[in-house]
Amino acid sequence: MNARIPRFLAMVIAITFSTTLFSQDLILNNRTIVKTGEGYTTTDGGTTFKVLGNEVVVKYANATSDLEKASLENTLGLTKLREASTGFTDYRLGEGSDFFSILQALESSPLVATVEVAMEGLYVLDPNDPLFP
């Protein structure tokens, strides 16, 4: 009976260690992003979405100059994919970049107003717009 307790304890420690090793969470704008062995996910309204771990969406603070943006992009190894008329810019992370570290660096930068993750989703409803094709 005494031999079972150490085995059980060792198994609990191993499971806890492997969960800690392969699962991490980051809270970004009241959204929890979970890193597992298979990638990144987030949940919204009870639905789990795949997060693209190599892309981020940034909206800069109003007073941020183009030179400051370029400097931040260079420092973090970001490649601009597209810039929307709404002021949001999509970036691809550099090869080998740590996704959570980049998110935290952008979130803490005074140059950045908002940072979001890019997610894969499925649109299941048509807009309630009479001009929608």
Image: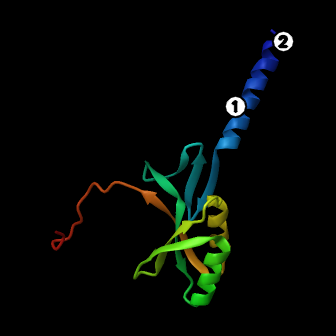
Q: In the figure, is residue 50 to the left or right of 26?
A: left
Which residue lies at the image location 28% right of the left edge and 54% below the top edge? 124
Which quarter of the picture shows residue 95? bottom right
Q: In the figure, is residue 61 to the left or right of 133?
A: right
Residue 50 visible? The answer is yes
Q: In the figure, is residue 84 to the left or right of 68?
A: left
Number of the label disc, if any, that sits on residue 15: 1
Which residue lies at the image location 47% right of the left edge and 77% below the top edge? 88
Residue 64 visible? The answer is no
Name the spot of residue 21 as percent of width and height, x first. 70, 42
| Quadrant in which the C terminus is drawn | bottom left
Which residue position is annotated with label 2? 2
Name the spot of residue 100 as percent of width and height, x first. 64, 59
As shown in the figure, which amino acid type bears the numbered disc 1? Ile
* Viewer-closest of 129 and 56: 56
Instruction: Estimate how packed mark 2 is, as few (under 14), some (14 to 19) or many (20 or more) residues with alpha carbons within 10 Å.
Output: few
Q: Secondary structure at mark 1?
A: helix
Number of the label disc, if any, that sits on residue 7: none
Q: Tell me: residue 14, above or below residue 2.
A: below
Name the spot of residue 58 as percent of width and height, x first. 53, 74
Name the spot of residue 19 as percent of width and height, x first. 67, 38
As shown in the figure, which amino acid type bears the numbered disc 2? Asn
